[in-house]
Image (cartoon, rainbow, N blue to C red):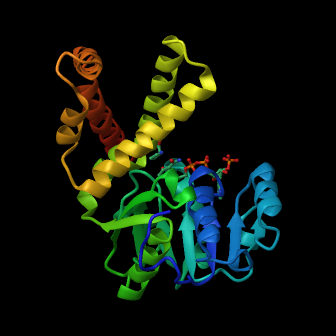
């Protein structure tokens, strides 16, 4: 788990609107870190299956099918619904948002839209990623004018309890989405590809997967902990006329580096469209 100064701080009670993948990753990570207690959690989701999941995992959390039935809305509302339904959520229960800190993780949805739909500007926009679930999230955030320093402190506490949190300018948010928001999916694909390669080369699947995962983890940890440029670390692996340079040459022929950059740029573009 990422070490940080805020991990032991606690948060005020929280309402999670949308208990799906991202909501589970953040709030699951927060509960695991001890930053929030399930008793202080309200989850709103129309899916009975989803509510059952929350009740099974955290029996003391209060689950609702609709925001309208929440009697006392907690001071922080974490909005983790799909971008196209955010406006509908806002308009379904306008009285519930008054005086609350609104935190949105929706890709592409701007602070301006949030303010217009929810009727006030105590709003913070966050782009997290699913590794929050295991305390290794990479999140960026930006705040509307109405969010106080204390509000921003709460969001930092929330995000740093489950990984790293970086304040950015809102115009960078969709690029962040294309890189770290969507990035875990790219890396999962790489891990799958490496494991497939191991199987293709004759290894049993479970051994290939174990080696692929540890290789990605080890390489990422080296970049983080040595502070060396990845190119330098790459050069140290590749012996003259050896195996690595032969593999790297294949990757370059397939333009893997450009494919990664194109993926981030295309995802950023999609974020622009969603907004
Ligand atoms: N998944 C990821 O890796 C990341 C996602 N995000 C953002 O997080 C948000 C959620 O994405 P994700 O968790 O993947 O999506 P999910 O579909 O997994 O979760 C969204 C949940 O919201 C529920 N929902 C639908 N309507 C309402 C409503 N009116 N009130 C409350 N809940 C509702 C859905 O129920 P039902 O299924 O029945 O519709 C579903 O359970 C998106 O805006 C996305 O951009 C940001 C970063 C990373
Ligand atoms: O795919 C998506 O749109 C969301 C946003 C970032 C990751 N998942």
* Residue at (66% x, 57% y) in the render: 19
Q: Is residue 161 left or right of residue 234?
A: right
* Residue at (68% x, 78% y) in the render: 37
Give the camera-side residue of 117 and 31: 31
Which quarter of the picture shows residue 14? bottom right
Q: Is residue 48 left or right of residue 169?
A: right
> Do we see residue 245 in this rendering?
yes
Give the camera-side residue of 261 and 69: 261
Which quarter of the picture shows residue 64? bottom right
Vertically, is 142 above or below 148? above
* Residue at (63% x, 68% y) in the render: 32
Give the camera-side residue of 19 and 221: 221
Give the camera-side residue of 252 and 69: 252
Vertically, is 248 above or below 33? above
Q: Is residue 29 left or right of residue 180?
A: right
Vertically, is 115 above or below 89? below
> Residue 149, position in %: x, y?
35, 86
* Picture mark count: 0
> Residue 35, position in %: x, y?
58, 77
* Residue at (28% x, 22% y) in the render: 244
> Residue 2, position in %: x, y?
45, 64
> Do we see residue 88 in this rendering?
no
> Residue 141, position in %: x, y?
36, 66
């Amino acid at each position: 788990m990422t070490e940080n100064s805020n991990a032991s701080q606690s948060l005020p009670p929280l309402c999670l609107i949308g208990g799906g993948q991202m909501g589970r990753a953040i709030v699951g990570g927060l509960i695991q870190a001890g930053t929030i207690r399930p008793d202080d959690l309200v989850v709103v989701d129309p899916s009975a299956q989803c509510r059952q999941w929350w009740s099974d995992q955290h029996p003391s959390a209060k689950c609702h099918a609709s925001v309208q039935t929440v009697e006392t809305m907690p001071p922080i509302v974490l909005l983790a619904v799909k971008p196209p339904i955010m406006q509908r959520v806002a308009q379904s229960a306008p009285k519930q948002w008054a005086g609350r800190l609104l935190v949105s993780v929706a890709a592409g949805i701007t602070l301006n839209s949030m303010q217009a739909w929810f009727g006030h500007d105590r709003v913070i926009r966050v782009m997290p990623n699913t590794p929050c679930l295991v305390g290794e999230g990479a999140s960026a955030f930006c705040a509307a004018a109405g969010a106080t320093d204390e509000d921003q402190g709460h969001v930092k506490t929330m995000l740093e309890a489950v990984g790293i949190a970086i304040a950015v300018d809102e115009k960078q948010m969709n690029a962040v989405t294309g890189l770290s928001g969507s990035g875990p999916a790219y890396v999962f694909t790489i891990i799958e590809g490496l494991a497939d390669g191991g199987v293709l080369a004759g290894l049993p699947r479970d051994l290939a997967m174990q080696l692929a995962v540890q290789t990605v983890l080890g390489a990422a940890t080296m970049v983080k902990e040595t502070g060396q440029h990845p190119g330098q670390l790459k050069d140290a692996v590749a012996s003259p006329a050896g195996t690595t340079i032969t593999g790297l040459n294949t990757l370059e022929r397939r333009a893997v580096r450009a494919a990664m950059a194109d993926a981030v740029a295309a995802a950023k573009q999609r974020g622009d469209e969603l907004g």
